[in-house]
Image (tube, grey):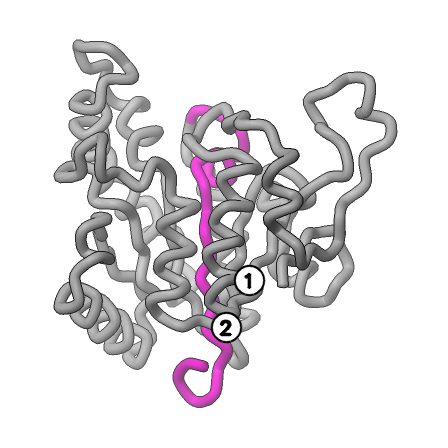
Amino acid sequence: MGKQGKKRVVLKIGTGTLTKGTGAISRGKLEDIGRQIVKLSDEYEFIIVSSGAIAVAKQFVDLEGTGKDINVKQALAAIGQPHLMRIIQESFRELKLLTAQCLISYTDIEHQQSKENIVNTINVLLENNYIPIINENDTVATEEIKFGDNDKLAALTAVLLAVDLLVMATNTYGLYNNDPNDPSSSHDLTTISEITNIEAILSTLPDTKSLQGSGGIKSKMQAAAIAQNAGIETWLVNGFEDDFLLKAIANTVEFTKVC
């Protein structure tokens, strides 16, 4: 529970959601997210875990080297992160929302002093009505200690901050009963509304990744398992929808709840 009894939420926004499936950050989607935060501000406070730095950089530069090379990705992240924050700040400022950048590496989560520093800093930001925008510190991470995607980072952040809810915005209406990439099952897709035995589900999921990001449905369910082990509920919602948070809270749209 956060300031003045508000529910504390970690909202994870992936590259696919931020770009609405294109190659560029969607200011319209950021405005949609900001408007929802404003409407929910009496009852909820938000910590955003945001991807997108590498996608932003690719709009400006084409670095030499192999695209999957970790050093190229780190360099792209270093170029893109300031631009990403500028776009978020500009979009949110129009709604009178204040933001602050927080870059975290895996080693920060492992060390007690670093964990305390993260919690204290974020608590001060929230108390002063700043929305922390968290991303992995890709510039200093190495392939061995990298989170791999921000799904796990979001879950670890949620546990560290003892939040009330983890919301993961994706490009589906949660977890389906069949594989949406299988043409033979596309006519029979329904959303699984609630999951309690997450380990049984994980063993059946493919390792597919999203087009723009580095995650996928299995990655999100693995993150949900981390949160579940800490007693934190996770929602998998379709971030492509306008007002996806408001609709999920009002239960007027299909989504998956892991509890």
Give the residue at the far right of this rendering: 188
Lower sequence index among marks 2 and 1 = 1
Quarter of the picture holding the N terminus:
bottom left
* Residue range of the region highlighted in magenta in the rendering: 1-23
Circle 2 residue: 164
The residue located at (30%, 81%) in the rendering is 127
Q: Position of residue 19 (x, y in %)?
A: 47, 34
- Dot 2 falls on a residue whose secondary structure is loop
Tell me if residue 12 is in the magenta stretch. Answer: yes
- Dot 1 falls on a residue whose secondary structure is helix
User: 233 above or below 15?
Assistant: below
Quarter of the picture holding the C terminus:
bottom right
Compare residues 113 and 75 and report the one nearer the observer: 113
Q: Along the horizontal axis of the image, is 256 left or right of 31?
A: right
The residue located at (50%, 27%) in the rendering is 209
Circle 1 residue: 36
